[in-house]
Image (cartoon, rainbow, N blue to C red):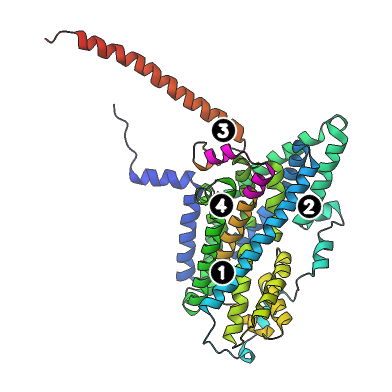
Amino acid sequence: MPQSVPSLPRRVARILRTSLFAQVAVALVLGIVVGKLWPDVATDLKPLGDGFTRLIKTIISPLVFCVVVVGIAKAGDLKAFGRIGLKALIWFEVASTLALVIGLLAANIVQPGSGMNVDPATLDTSAIDAKTGGGSLPSTTEFIVNAIPTSFIGAFAENELLQVLILACLVGAALLHLGHTKVPKVLPAIEQAQEIIFAVVGFIMRLAPIAVFGAMAVLIGQYGLGVIETYAKLIILCYAAAALFIALLAVALKMVTGLSLWKFLRYIREEMLLALGTASTESVMPRVMLKLRKAGARDDAVGLVLPTGYSFNLDGASLYLSIGTLFIAQAVGVDLSLGQQITVILVLMLTSKGMAGIPGSAFLALSATASSLGAIPAGAVALLLGVDRIMDSMRVVTNLLGNCVAVFAVSRWEGALDLERAKKVLDREIVISEDDDAPEAADVQEAADVNETAEVKEAAKALVVPAQVSEAKEPAS
């Protein structure tokens, strides 16, 4: 008997029940509707997104520590780990500088702020202080010193990723030095802790649609859709520049590894949609680390390059800062010379590195840049208050893709990438289950399924062919 085809409502219900992508997409749309129709109610939903982000942040530091320690111990070569770090920093600097240059070129060509003729004296700068909490970006010296932990427990308690990375490197080096004979139970314990953390990530991710719903409702309810009309030229320019930069990333990834960025984007579509909904790349960091490992990148490369990129490789933020600086200058009628624009690049190359985790960091960086030039009133930064939240989507997508491409490129550069596996995963020849944290087991099962299917087909063929031959020999009645 032919199998009955499930009805459309049942198919939709099954997709919503099993697909995180579908759940997040529906939550995104519902958040926009609620924010538009009931803005007062929407503002009360902020704890939904904030609570999810806090849950994710609690496991980022221990996860990074475990992945890095296990990666160093299994690689068995601390020098190789050092080379990965150096190559990652080189990649980060080239990529972020390219983003800054693209942003400046785009702002010079399109002139998004020209003709606004804004008087800086009429702007309310008190909102900037509220946004930044009266803080400031650390200097280069402070940034380096702050990366050195003062307490083993404190680095985890304060969620300082760079400090956790340093501690992980020291512990991994100590394991290599002592060898598995002196501390035979430590590495297996850390590996088991890593599996527990990934299981916790799976539990928390079930709350992702609720977080996206709350975050999107707050965004639309607080800022509305009218701000898009007011700043349409600037918004379109930023997103177009980001699209150009991502296209260059795709070319670079293809040249270095032979992998397709568009296939990778399909592979992490759930994480990308969640990052867009919550306006945070931290919310998807654990899942992205897991998927990069399953796609063939070695543990030590993933554990070092991706977390470091969250501090050193903010490509989307670099694009926004360079375009935003010129937008402000054009809006208040300041014509920046070529030398001043070069100064903008140099200043932003430094200030963008210390932005991660600091409230209102974009405004602090813009204020610091304006002050260093001496030609732009610092209060003019308030012009971007209304549009800053709209730019989060651009920054999140560009930052996340930039860091993932860096993992693949540096891994390939160092020989820490299983390229054959990566191609099979991105081509869907190896199907990764959302709930499966053991890629090797998934591969074995898939191979068994393929072999079983082949055997069934051969058996069926062996049965059918003789029957067809005997039928052919029978005389017609």
Q: What number is the disc on residue 382?
A: none
Mark 3: few/some/many CA within 10 Å (<14, 14-19, 20+): some
Q: Quadrant of residue 180?
A: top right
Mark 4 neighbour class, 10 Å CA radius: few under 14, some 14 to 19, many 20 or more? many
Secondary structure type for disc 3: helix
Side of 163 relative to 125 (left or right): right
Mark 2 or 1 closer to N-term?
A: 2
For label 1, the SS is helix
Residue bounds of the magenta highlight: 408-425
Q: Is residue 431 above or below residue 220?
A: above
Residue 309, quarter of picture = bottom right
Q: Residue 368: x percent and y percent?
A: 72, 77
Residue most toward the left? 477
- Is label 4 in a helix, a strand or a loop? helix
Which disc number belongs to residue 271? 4
Marks 3 & 4, CB-CB < 8 Å contact: no
Residue type of the residue flagged with mark 2: Val
SS under mark 2: helix
Residue 474 placement, left or right of 392: left
Q: Amino acid at mark 4?
A: Glu
- From the image, which quarter does the N terminus lie in? top left
Q: Residue under circle 2? A: 164
**Whether label 4 touches label 2, CB < 8 Å:** no
Is 413 magenta? The answer is yes
Label 1 environment density (alpha carbons within 10 Å; few <14, some 14–19, many ≥20): some
